[in-house]
Amino acid sequence: MNQPQKAKGMPEGAFEIMPAGKEYAPYIASDTIIPEVTSRSIILGLIMAVVFSAAAAFLGLKIGQVFEAAIPIAIIAVGVSPLFKRKNTILENVIIQSIGGASGLIVAGAIFTLPALFILGLDKKIGFDLFKIFMVSFLGGTLGVLFLIPFRKYFVKEMHGQFPFPEATATAQILVAGEKGGAQARILVKSMIIGGIFDFMVHSVGAFNEVFTTRIFGFGKVLAEKVKIVLKMDVLSAVLGLGYIIGLKYTSIIAAGSLLSWFLLVPLIYYFGQFIPAEIVGNAPKLISAMSAEEIFRNYVRYIGIGAIAMAGIIGILKSSKIIVQAFGMGFKQMLRKTAIGDEKTPRTQTDLSMKYVIFGLAVTALVIWVFFSFSVLSPVPHPLKLGLIAMVTVFVISFLFTSVAARAIAIVGTNPVSGMTMMTLILSSLVLVAAGLTGEYGMFAALLIGGVVCTALSMSGGFITDLKIGYWLGSTPLKQQKYKFLGILLSSLTVGLVIFLLNQTYGFSGSNALAAPQANAMAALIQPLMNPGAQVPWLLYGVGVLTALIMEFIGVPPLAFALGMYIPLELNTPLVIGGLIAHLVMRSSKDKELATKRYDKGILIASGFIAGGAIIGVVSAIMKYFNLERFVRLGWSENGGGEPLALVMFIALAIYLYFDSRSAKKED
């Protein structure tokens, strides 16, 4: 057995286009055999899948952004490696990260769509159980992996050096650094504890408010009442950490979209609403003149955001049309290729799951989808077999066409425009189902489950390309990554269903105190008029959003980020900008580029800890609330009038800590 030489960092040419005739040499050479799939890698990977599925589900439903679990899982894998008292565990850590990383991907697909069923009350009217959530998540995750396999060589090998892969870069660097020790894991654990305690003081103890608003000031209260302008900010550590990782550029764009909605559109609609005092506009429950800023946003402005998100998805597809055509060609070439997986000419680091198994897997998945929709989802309606077939074809066509869009987005900016593509899926599937004669509650039910499968498939394909790129850099066997990814999908699908049901019981997804679930609320608002012929559809508001996204594209602003900002509540966007600003300041805290990078990287670890710790505590707090255990720890200071000022002070203190602790990194660290 060959042993790898001790390396100090990523191999030469890892992030560059290779010269003609020269192949990239991975961290672990293709002819070197070290452990990859072991009992340690499988067990720890599955534990990470369960833990981070629960954490990501809470955070995603809270703020509409699912954090990528890859980095914290990689750090944990690195941190526990010394416990096993042996070297060369890097490829085992890749498998741990790959299995565990299924958590955030499955969660994104589930929480963007399935809570809409609760929002619309379909869980009580039709019946929606844990089995259906599991099936939607598992089928979508399976499709995402199978559809991506023909794309692997194009994205990770043929385009080597041309795509930055930001998420994969960070994770790979951590895994390589882990071969030298577990210092980064200690930083992560410390920040997880800080973030967890901070958010626990909000969720369960009630030491201070979660949201600070300008209504606590005299002038702020007047502005909110007279012109419907109010500034709000969520103080949770997890949101601050997420902003740091996203960075100043994209957080600024997201915030700009939010400011357009809250500081321009909301006051504008309120102003004109004063001149129509005797008529309710649209499907709103009351007159515009009697609404608060939040009510105007919820009943009118969010539809503009929905239109913008949908248009941003269309723009992404059009810009990726060449990739889709190339993917079709590559897929067919793979199917017709006669070289066997075990052929000695194929290096270990380039062996994929055989295309015959991919085709067989897709055929079985198609059959299961048809059976699921025909006999479980649509059995009470007329012609269930026909409608089940329509559902299956819709899922397959859209999932395959959008796979390259998701993978390309992740490869370039690390952000998957899955929400916009899912909205398009809902519109297309609704139109198809209505044409087939299915409307009303069962129409919404079927369309949302179709959207859930597609959303999960696209989330998985976008995220799995990150895993495969990490494997390409470090020398993993793609075949093993592909096979064992299904284990992570299985456990994550079970976990996310349990968490969704728990959060629905404790917080709910609609009402004043409910979880935001912004994407799911958008899906519910979109699907309802489409499936109820004669209902008033806010096409004009959708159209304004479409034009807004087009304008952003024309002036060079990423339309999806701007559109998400238009829809996601203001209080969740303002702290993102502060986190992004801290990252910007840390990166420019020294003229020494190497030192500045060290500081910024330490901030990434701290921010990841905030996200993981805060999100996990969010789930713990939900469990405590569910079992009525909060009464033993709750102080209730936030209910006594001083919660908002203290929230602002605590948030400032946390932001200062993030900045100065990040700056404490040294070049020799």
Image (tube, rainbow, N blue to C red):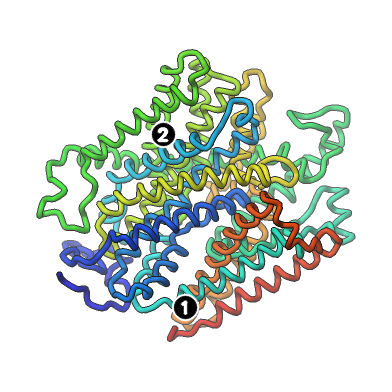
Q: Is residue 15 left or right of residue 298?
A: left
Please identify the quadrant where the N terminus is shown: bottom left
Give 557 or 129, whichever is nearer the viewer. Answer: 129
Identified at 29% across, 42% down, the residue is: 326
Q: Is residue 136 left or right of residue 628?
A: left
Identified at 73% across, 42% down, the residue is: 297
Q: Secondary structure at mark 2?
A: helix
Residue at mark 2: 398
Q: Which mark is residue 598?
A: 1
Identified at 35% across, 57% down, the residue is: 42
Please identify the quadrant where the C terminus is shown: bottom left
Q: Is residue 90 left or right of residue 526?
A: left
Would you identify the image quadrant in which residue 47 lies? bottom left
Q: Which mark is residue 382?
A: none
Q: Please provide percent x and percent y for residue 175.
A: 37, 69
Please tell me whether residue 264 is drawn above or below residue 25 in the rendered image. Answer: above
Q: The residue under label 1 is which amino acid type?
A: Lys
Q: CA distance from mark 1 to mark 2?
A: 42 Å
Q: The residue under label 2 is which amino acid type?
A: Ile
Residues packed near mark 2 inside 10 Å, few (<14), some (14 to 19) or many (20 plus): many
Q: Please provide percent x and percent y for residue 590.
A: 53, 82
